[in-house]
């Protein structure tokens, strides 16, 4: 878009979708840009369904991927840098008049940073609404119906199926191999890290699986991906319809007084 096109869109599109991705290993059979492209392609579907009331910001193509740095090609930002990138993108949109922003995050490793950046944004720009979500997190029931692996979460049948449906060029089907998909196959630290869901004890992926995958991508299918994406699309657009309809929060007449520690 040119700037006059953006100016015109601003008059009819109260919502901006900001896709967040990564550049990181996705096992032997998927491209490094998988998370970014999945977020962008879902954002396009949402924007098409809601046209002309939504626009898509440029995607963030590098995220927080320290846990994948054991594999060539992975790029990572520090948590501080990614947080500031998200903050300043939203700040820019705010300066141009947008007050409703949705962060569509294609990479689970970004989650904690998205949460912290969102806290800062809400505190600094109280006259706007900001929401966020991942992709798979929108459809846990659809995923659970498919008999997926005991251990999954990266370059698995879930993520690979989404890629096969949204952007099949990302997937080298002849190179797909099963990743670690049973807890019993992990080393002691890996097993402990997956034993208690409420306890956070992350492990780098090169220690979890020699190919960098958790789950079995060889059983992925575009049909499973389509079921996931269609359900995610329905649920996300339903939320965003209501999100757009919300009145904006009232802007304080004076800056809030900082609390004493």
Image (cartoon, rainbow, N blue to C red):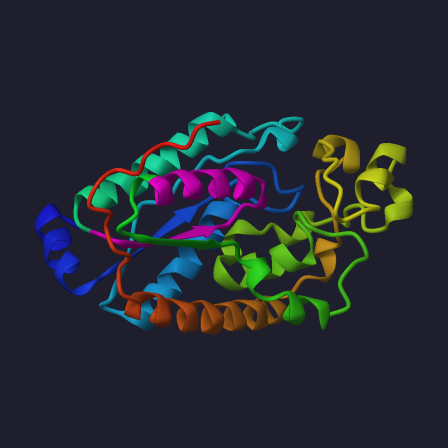
Q: Nearer the viewer, residue 168 or 255?
A: 255
Q: Is residue 48 above or below residue 74?
A: below
Q: Nearer the viewer, residue 19 or 95?
A: 95
In the displayed structure image, the side of residue 74 where residue 202 appears, left or right: right
Magenta region, residue range: 98-123
Extreme residue in the front direction? 260
Q: At 43% across and 33% down in the image, what residue appears? A: 83
Extreme residue in the left direction? 4
In the displayed structure image, the side of residue 227 where residue 98 appears, left or right: left
Q: Nearer the viewer, residue 38 or 177?
A: 38
Q: At 11% across and 46% down in the image, what residue appears? A: 3
x, y percent for residue 232: 51, 67
Q: Nearer the viewer, residue 223 or 109?
A: 109
x, y percent for residue 8: 10, 58
- The verdict on residue 107 being magenta is yes
Q: Is residue 130 above or below residue 138?
A: above
x, y percent for residue 189: 85, 33
Q: Main secondary structure of the magenta part?
A: helix
Query: Does the rendering let one see residue 90?
Result: yes
x, y percent for residue 160: 62, 56
Q: At 55% across and 63% down in the image, what residue appears? A: 138
Q: At 48% across and 38% down in the image, what residue appears? A: 116
In the displayed structure image, the side of residue 115 where residue 88 appears, left or right: left
Query: Does the rendering let one see residue 77?
Result: no
């Amino acid at each position: 878009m040119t700037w006059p096109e953006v100016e015109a869109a601003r008059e009819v599109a109260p919502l901006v979708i900001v896709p967040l991705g990564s550049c990181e290993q996705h096992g032997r059979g998927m491209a490094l840009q998988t998370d970014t492209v999945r977020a962008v392609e879902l954002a396009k579907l949402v924007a098409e369904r809601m046209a002309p009331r939504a626009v898509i910001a440029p995607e963030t193509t590098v995220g927080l991927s320290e846990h994948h740095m054991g594999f060539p090609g992975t790029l990572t930002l520090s948590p501080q840098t990614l947080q500031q990138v998200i903050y300043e993108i939203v700040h820019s949109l705010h300066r141009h008049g947008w007050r409703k922003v949705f962060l569509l995050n294609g990479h689970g490793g970004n989650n904690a940073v998205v949460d912290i950046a969102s806290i800062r944004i809400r505190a600094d720009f109280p006259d706007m609404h900001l929401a966020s979500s991942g992709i798979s997190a929108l459809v846990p029931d659809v995923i659970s119906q498919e008999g997926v692996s005991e251990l999954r979460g990266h370059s698995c049948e879930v993520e690979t199926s989404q890629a096969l449906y949204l952007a099949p060029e990302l997937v080298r089907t002849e190179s797909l191999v099963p990743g670690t998909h049973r807890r019993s196959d992990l080393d002691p630290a890996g097993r402990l890290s997956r034993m208690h869901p409420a306890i956070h004890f992350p492990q780098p992926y090169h220690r979890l699986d020699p190919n960098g995958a958790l789950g079995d991508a060889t059983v992925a299918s575009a049909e499973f991906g389509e079921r996931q994406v269609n359900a995610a699309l329905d649920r996300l657009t339903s939320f965003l319809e209501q999100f757009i309809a919300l009145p904006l929060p009232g802007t304080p007449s004076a800056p809030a007084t900082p609390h004493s520690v």
